[in-house]
Image (cartoon, rainbow, N blue to C red):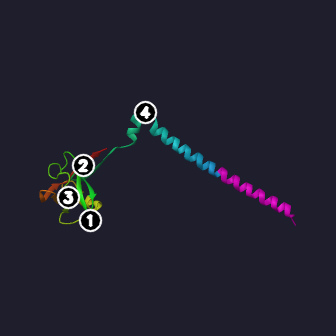
């Protein structure tokens, strides 16, 4: 039979061991996170800008009409048109989108999906302007490359 003094000493030793284990494991995790952060900072924060530009591509491509859209209240409007895109000269900035191929998307995401499609296919868009009324525009989608 153990004495109460021995049992409390054993409990204290176990508690100290558990605390030390937590501190050591936490230090290992912290050291790993710091090493990973340092490697990332070294890779992208170095003085060689050319390697950083090779690692990050600042452009993307999609097939569509080249109109940048946004939600405005309950409507979706054309915020801008990319130069040389199918929408260039056919749809003006500020046009309110009404329908696309006879459908009425109810969100910006729905409009984006409806306006995109395979290159070479056509899409008919109904737009409205504040002072000009409604207009139907048929455009042929093409590959659009956007650089940031």
Label 3 close to label 4 by CB (< 8 Å): no
Residue 79 left/right relative to 90: right
Q: Which residue is mark 1?
A: 106
How busy is the neighbourhood of tag 1: few (under 14 within 10 Å), some, or many (20 plus)? Answer: few
Q: Nearer the viewer, mark 1 or mark 4?
A: 1
Is 111 covered by the magenta stretch?
A: no
Kindly report the distance in space between the C-alpha atoms of the residues bearing marks 2 and 1: 24 Å
Residue 95 position, x and y percent, is 19, 55
- Secondary structure under tag 3 reads strand
Q: Is there any visible trace of residue 117 in the rendered image? A: no
- Secondary structure under tag 2 reads strand
Q: Nearer the viewer, mark 3 or mark 2?
A: 3
Q: Which residue is mark 4?
A: 48
Q: Which mark is residue 144?
A: 2
50 relative to 128, above or below: above
Q: Nearer the viewer, mark 3 or mark 4?
A: 3
Q: Which residue is mark 3?
A: 96
């Amino acid at each position: 039979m153990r004495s109460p003094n021995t049992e409390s000493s054993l409990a204290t030793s176990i508690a100290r061991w558990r605390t030390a284990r937590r501190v050591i494991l936490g230090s290992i995790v912290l050291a790993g996170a710091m090493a990973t952060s340092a490697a990332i900072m070294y890779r992208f924060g170095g003085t060689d800008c050319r390697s950083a530009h090779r690692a990050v591509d600042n452009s993307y491509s999609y097939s569509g009409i080249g109109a940048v859209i946004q939600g405005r209240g309950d409507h979706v409007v054309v915020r801008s048109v990319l130069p040389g895109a199918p929408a260039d000269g056919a749809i003006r900035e500020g046009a309110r989108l009404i329908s696309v191929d006879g459908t009425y998307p109810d969100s910006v995401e729905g409009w984006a999906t409806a306006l995109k499609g395979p290159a070479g296919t056509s899409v008919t868009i109904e737009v409205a302007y504040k002072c000009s009324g409604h207009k139907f525009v048929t455009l042929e989608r093409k590959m659009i490359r956007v650089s940031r």
